[in-house]
Every structure is written in C-alpha cells, then in structure tokens.
Amino acid sequence: MSFEIVGSIDHAETIATGSGILVLRHLRKQYGAGRWRKRKGSATIRLPNGTFRKVELHWYEAHGIGMRDIKIKRYID
C-alpha cells in the first residue's frame, strides 16, 4: 500500500457479494475461505509525499480475515 488511511472510512457500503465478485477465486486462494464482500467508502489518506487527499476506496473483506486489496478508485477533492 503506497498510502496511509488517516481516521475512519465514511459512507462504507457493499457493492458485491459472493459470486458477484469477479476475483473470488483469487481471494479464496490467497487469503482463505470466507464470506467475501467487495466494499467502497470514502476516507482521508496520506500519500508518500506527505499530502492529504480525500478519496474513494474500494476493498475486499471477509469476517475473521479483514480488509484486503485496498485501492484508490478516485480522488474526491
């Protein structure tokens, strides 16, 4: 991850579950079986150069496994 999440993630919502996730096979192979969900939300991050930006994040998560493959989808500010 080339950024650090500062604070909490706001407006988190589920955008896909189960077989609706295109990379479900990869997630199960890499991190293990679980009830995987693809989620999105907005947060403030700190980039490697020290600047703060408000962004929309997408990630995958499963109970007991946690958040994985967090990526910046777009800059909001």
Image (cartoon, grey):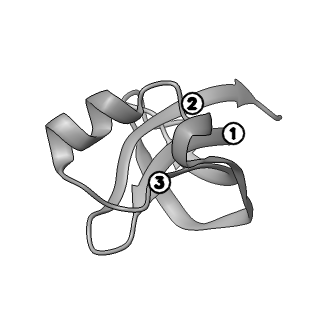
Which residue matches tag 1?
A: 55
Which numbered disc flags the more N-terminal residue, 1 or 3? 3
Query: For mark 1, does the 10 Å Cα neighbourhood hold few (<14), some (14 to 19), or many (20 or more) residues?
Result: many
For label 2, the SS is strand
* 39 is higher (above) or lower (below) than 69: below
Which residue matches tag 2?
A: 72
Q: Are marks 2 and 1 in contact (CB under 8 Å)?
A: yes
Residue 2 visible from this viewpoint = no
Which numbered disc flags the more N-terminal residue, 2 or 1? 1
Quadrant of the frame with the C terminus: top right
Residue 1 is drawn in which quadrant? Answer: top left
For label 3, the SS is strand
* Res. 24 mark: none
The three-letter amino acid code for the residue at tag 3 is Ile
Marks 3 and 2: which is nearer the front?
Answer: 2
Task: State how far apart marks 1 and 3 are (Cα).
Answer: 10 Å
The three-letter amino acid code for the residue at tag 2 is Ile
* 19 is higher (above) or lower (below) than 23: below
